[in-house]
Image (spheres, rainbow, N blue to C red):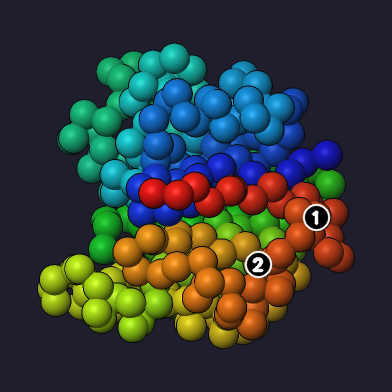
């Protein structure tokens, strides 16, 4: 059975896997290759199960382990033209990498899942989210680094059985935390991130059957604040209630 695995989720690095031990897609590679492979192995996912990598955008917390991973396990890499160009310019791919442009709203097919990209509002050229259609007809969407919800985002995730949605910061902790005013403004802006308070309302609007929150930062939120949000009850179980998708969520580690 296909599952959704949120392998890593924080400002220090992000990665997810959609599929099964027989095959699937890695979404972003924001930690070292060693840690990626260790996390996959911990979920009984062999390295060869990764049939493709989808990159949401070019920020380091999504691509830190990409070059080494592709060197060890060459698979197609999907991203928007802007994302691939930026990563190529900064030498984040092996020379012989199989790069495949995906257009917004375009659907591509791997051996195990169908993938549709949709544009997102974030301060990285070509930033996008992804919607996945699994062999059993279930759907899930990855929607990270989201400054605001646009009609394209709504269309991309509406009705999905599971959505990985950003919940990035607590407004008070951000305001009184260590970040300079310019960075705080960037985080709060329409090309920045969703706050913990915004995310539940967004989830309710999108009417996903199951929501898993993503992107917790130790400097901008703490577990007791984040877990106290009413919508946390939507995603507290390992198995997604009411859907055929299993959600194996990441475990928070102490900094």
Left or right? Give the position of 110 relative to 29: right
Tag 2: Cα neighbours inside 10 Å, few (<14), some, or many (≥20)?
many
Characterize the local packing of mark 1: few (<14), some (14-19) or many (20 or more) Cα atoms within 10 angstroms: some
**Mark nearer the N terminus (2 vs 1):** 2
Residue at image location 18% in from the left, 35% down from the top: 89
Q: Would you say residue 23 is visible in this rendering?
A: no
Q: Position of residue 76 (x, y in %)?
A: 48, 28
Q: Above or below — where is 144 with respect to 94?
A: below
Q: CA distance from mark 2 to mark 1?
A: 12 Å
The dot on residue 239 is 1
Tell me the quarter of the picture where residue 46 sits.
Answer: top right
Helix or strand or loop: what does disc 2 sit on? strand
> In the figure, is residue 19 to the left or right of 103?
right
2 vs 1, front mark: 1
Find numbered disc 1 in the image and state the secondary structure of the residue it sits on.
Answer: loop
Residue 34 vs 188, above or below: the answer is above
- Residue at image coords 34%, 26%: 67
85 relative to 227 in the view: left or right: left
Q: Is residue 143 left or right of residue 93?
A: right
Q: Position of residue 148 (x, y in %)?
A: 40, 77
What residue did someone put label 2 on? Answer: 211
Q: Is residue 211 above or below residue 9?
A: below
Q: Is residue 41 above or below residue 182?
A: above
Q: Are marks 2 and 1 in contact (CB under 8 Å)?
A: no
Instruction: Return the residue nearer the eye: 235 or 203.
Output: 235
* Whether residue 11 is visible: yes
Residue at position x 34%, y 16% in the image: 96
x 33%, y 77%: residue = 173
Residue 7, position as x, y percentages in the image: 56, 42
């Amino acid at each position: 059975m296909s599952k959704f695995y949120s392998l890593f989720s924080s400002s220090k690095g992000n990665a997810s896997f959609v599929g099964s031990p027989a095959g699937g897609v890695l979404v972003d590679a924001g930690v070292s290759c060693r840690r990626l492979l260790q996390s996959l192995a911990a979920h009984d996912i062999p390295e060869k199960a990764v049939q493709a990598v989808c990159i949401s955008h070019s920020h380091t917390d999504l691509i830190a382990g990409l070059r080494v991973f592709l060197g060890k396990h060459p698979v197609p890499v999907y991203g928007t033209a802007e994302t691939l160009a930026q990563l190529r310019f900064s030498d984040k791919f092996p020379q012989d990498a199989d790069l495949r442009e995906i257009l917004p709203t375009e659907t591509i097919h791997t051996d195990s899942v169908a993938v549709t990209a949709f544009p997102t509002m974030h301060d990285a050229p070509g930033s996008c989210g992804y919607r996945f259609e699994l062999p059993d007809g279930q759907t899930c969407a990855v929607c990270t680094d989201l400054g605001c919800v646009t009609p394209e985002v709504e269309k991309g995730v509406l009705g999905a059985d599971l959505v990985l949605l950003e919940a990035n910061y607590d407004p008070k902790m951000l305001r009184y935390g260590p970040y300079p005013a310019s960075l705080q403004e960037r985080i709060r802006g329409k090309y920045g991130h969703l706050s913990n308070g915004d995310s539940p309302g967004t989830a309710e609007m999108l009417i996903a059957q199951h929501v898993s929150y993503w992107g917790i930062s130790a400097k901008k939120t703490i577990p007791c604040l984040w877990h106290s949000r009413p919508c946390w009850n939507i995603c507290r179980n390992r198995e997604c209630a009411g859907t055929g998708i299993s959600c194996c969520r990441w475990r928070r580690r102490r900094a």
